[in-house]
Amino acid sequence: MAAEDRTTGSAGLAIGSGSRLTRICVRVVLLFGVLISLFPFYWLVVLASGTTQDIYRYPPKLVPGPHLLDNMGRVLDTVDFFGSLFNTVVVAVLGTLLVLFFDSLAAFAFAKYEFPAKKLLFGMLLVTYMIPAQLSLVPQFVTMAEFGWAGSLNALIIPSAANAFGIFWMRQYAQNSLPDELLDAGRIDGAGFFRLYWTVALPLFRPALAFLGIFTFIGLWNDYIWPLVVLIDPERVTLQVALANLNTLYNTDYSLVMAGSLMSVVPLIIVFLLGARHFLRDLAAGATKM
């Protein structure tokens, strides 16, 4: 009996040591991944805090320089940073809210309702997702011009109010996380389509909406080509277009460009840090339900 206990104790000690070693290896791998992920941002800080001559230096400098505040001040003197920042915030916030509403509404209908040509419409929706966005620049610009929206922020917000990826993503989530029994119970209580969507479906969509919201917000914030094409008025440009004006035809001050890029990234990081706790909590809750 004593020999069996010693055997069991040795096996338990071996299993405990093995699991501890596994945890250490996992943490080392995760730490390595975090460092690799953060290095581009650190390198951006290094380039933004130096001069253009420092960027071309070999071997390159690996520590931040003393010119960060000077470069940021020159960015503010060169472009209307806060005006373009305001335009970008308006486009990103309103565009994200519209995407969350229309995509979740369409996904709810595709996932839980039957209607004529449902599969055909969903297939056509997926086909539009496969078409490169550059191919639609000209017809989209002509459409915005006919509406009188060329040069205004409406041309950025309205066309981005719904997208095929968001509908596809929300439909897949709705099929797996929204029980039909809940909808049947709501119908017995007399709830219609919009009441079922608002009171039953939407609270269960929160984890998927959190991901889609961050994904859409970052996409609208960093969008460059479409705002460059459609925004004619210099006072209406977004942040990415304004920062592109830091490049001149004959000379490019890369330290200035890097400082402007760093300033454009900081609001995104703040938004993510403020919403990270809610995003991770909803994501964990959604994973548990699924």
Image (tube, grey):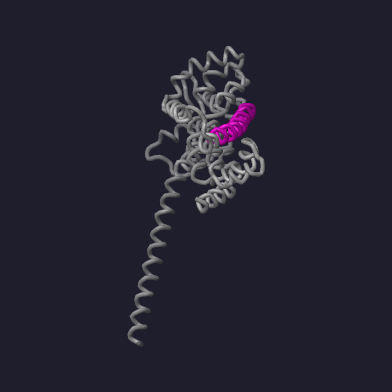
**One can see residue 195 in this view:** yes
- The one nearer the camera, 148 or 255, is 148
- The one nearer the camera, 149 or 258, is 149
**One can see residue 73 in this view:** no
Q: Residue 210 lies in magenta, yes or no?
A: no
135 shown above or below 66: above
- Report the residue at 64% width, 42% height from top: 199
- Indicate left or right for 128 with 236 as reference: left
The residue most toward the bottom is 2
15 shown above or below 167: below
Q: Position of residue 263 (x, y in %)?
A: 56, 35
How many callouts does the rendering have?
0
- The one nearer the camera, 155 or 29, is 155
- Indicate left or right for 70 with 37 as reference: right
127 shown above or below 23: above
Q: Position of residue 92 (x, y in %)?
A: 59, 32
- Report the residue at 63% width, 20% height from top: 235
Magenta extent: 81-107
Q: Position of residue 68 (x, y in %)?
A: 55, 38
